Structures are given as structure tokens and as C-alpha cells.
Image (tube, rainbow, N blue to C red):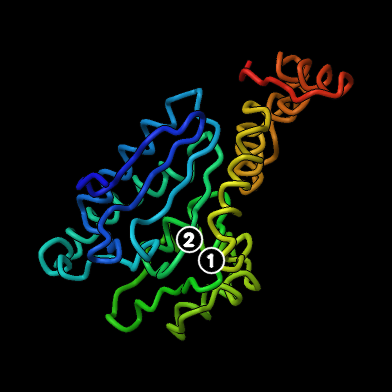
Amino acid sequence: MSVDPIFSVRDGTVARVTLNRPERRNALDAAMWRALAAAMEKFAADGSVRCVVLSGAGDSFGAGADIAEFERERGTPAQAEAYGRMMVAALDAIRLCPHPTLAAIKGACMGAGLEIAVACDLRIAASSAKFGAPIQKIGVVMPWPELAMFVELIGRAATLEMLLEGRIWSAADAATKGLVTRSVDDSQFEREVEETVARIASGAPLSQRLHKRMVRRLGDLRPLEPAEFALAYDAVSFEDYREGIRAFLEKRKPEFRGR
């Protein structure tokens, strides 16, 4: 595998982005955050991508932040804020990616690694995976943008449980709390990930992108504008809509082209 901090590759219509620092269990440093943002922005701009899969090299998804660089890179409030903006740029590149995103999680998924997983649309976890954000043990505070992602996903009570206790959750715990989409036995993990990717990638891409956009918009309490309300109905003008109907009636697999 490449020595780049983030390894990214196209596999047909699927983009794969790998945290690539296995010797440190993919603990995230500044170079990784910058490379992650660049990789996600590249794939977001590629209209032929149907799904982006994020994973970690080696035996962990991401063990958290690289604490070894904290004093150098995050030693003052101004440095911490600048570093935080860099992190949020990468997390937003995942969260706002127009294509469906899937985190394939094995091993440790902690702190900064967990934030990356939470920014994805779906999270599939191996049953032996571990989750947590025990940052109270080093006295650091999760900034507002990251905190908001957790509250949106698992709610206020579960977010506070995770942060105040600093307890490590099993994959079963994470599934119960809604932190992961589902947990599967380690022996079935790779197969489940690939089957999930295949289901996503086989869907009509414009439909997938609109669903992401609309679900995200519903998190905004402002009333929908008429043009926004009409968005779902405008989808019947897509060529993919007509192809989907024809394929259903002809009992064949549709050939969606993203038009």
C-alpha cells in the first residue's frame, strides 16, 4: 500500500479512501486531515462516483488523534482553533459529499477516527470493533461542529454518556445507541461491506444524491421554499426515472446513467 497518509483509489463506480498509518493504528495528524479533505473533494467532484467507502489500513479504523503533536500543533487557543478548522474542512468534505458515504469499521474507532465515521452516511462495524471518545482523560473539549454531529446522530443523552464517562463501547453498544448502522460478525464483515456497497452503487445516482440533500435540509428548521418542496417531484423528469420504470416493467436490471 502507498506510504501516503491517505490512500485513495477508484474501483469502478466506487471510490475507496483509506486512513493509511497502520503503524499508529491510523491516529490522525495534520497531514492526514489535509490529505483526507483533498481526497474527498476530488471524489465529490466526480459525477461518475456512486459510493465512497472509508476504512482504515491494518487492524483499526482510526485510534483517535495523534496526541504526540498536540503541544506543537494545538498548544494555544489560536492554534487549536486553526487546527479545528482544518479538521472541520475534512469532516465537511465527507458530510457534504454528494455521493453516499460508508464507513467500514474494524478495530479501534476512537475520538477523531470516530468523528470521521460519524460524518459518513452509513457505518458498518465488525463485531469486535470498539468505539469511544475518552477525551476527558486528557482534558480536551470536543468543538461545536463535531459535537453537533454526535448530538444529531445519537442524541443529547448518549453523547453526554460517551463524553462524560469516557467509556469504550462495544459494537453491540454502538448499534443499540444508533452510533453504527449495524454490527456484523467479524467473519462476515468484508462480505457485508461489499454487499452494502453494491446495493448503494446499483441505485439511481441522482435519486441517491437528492435523498442526501433533502435529509440534510430537514435538519434546518427554516420552512421549505416552494422550489425546495418541488425538488422531489422534479425527479420524474430525469432519464433515470424513465429507465427505472421501463426496467421494472421489462423485468430487467436498470442501467442508470445519472441523467
Q: Residue at x 23, y 49 (%)?
A: 5
**Kind of residue at badge 2:** Ile
Horizontal and vertical percent position of residue 181: 62, 60
Name the residue furthest left.
72
Name the residue furthest right.
249
Q: CA distance from mark 1 to mark 2?
A: 6 Å
Quarter of the image with the C terminus in it: top right
Q: Nearer the viewer, residue 56 or 100?
A: 56
Horizontal and vertical percent position of residue 54: 44, 49
- N-term-proximal mark, 1 vs 2: 2
| Badge 1 vs badge 2, beta-carbon distance below 8 Å | yes
Q: Residue at x 34, y 39 (%)?
A: 8
Report which quarter residue 139 is drawn in: bottom left
Considering only vertical position in the picture, is 148 above or below 86?
below
Label of residue 105 in the image: 2
**Kind of residue at badge 1:** Ala
Horizontal and vertical percent position of residue 152: 58, 59
Provide the residue designation for mark 1.
126
Is 222 on the left-hand or right-hand side of 193?
right
Considering only vertical position in the picture, is 160 above or below 216?
below
Q: Residue at x 25, y 51 (%)?
A: 32
Counting every numbered tag in the picture gives 2
Is 38 on the left-hand or right-hand side of 227?
left
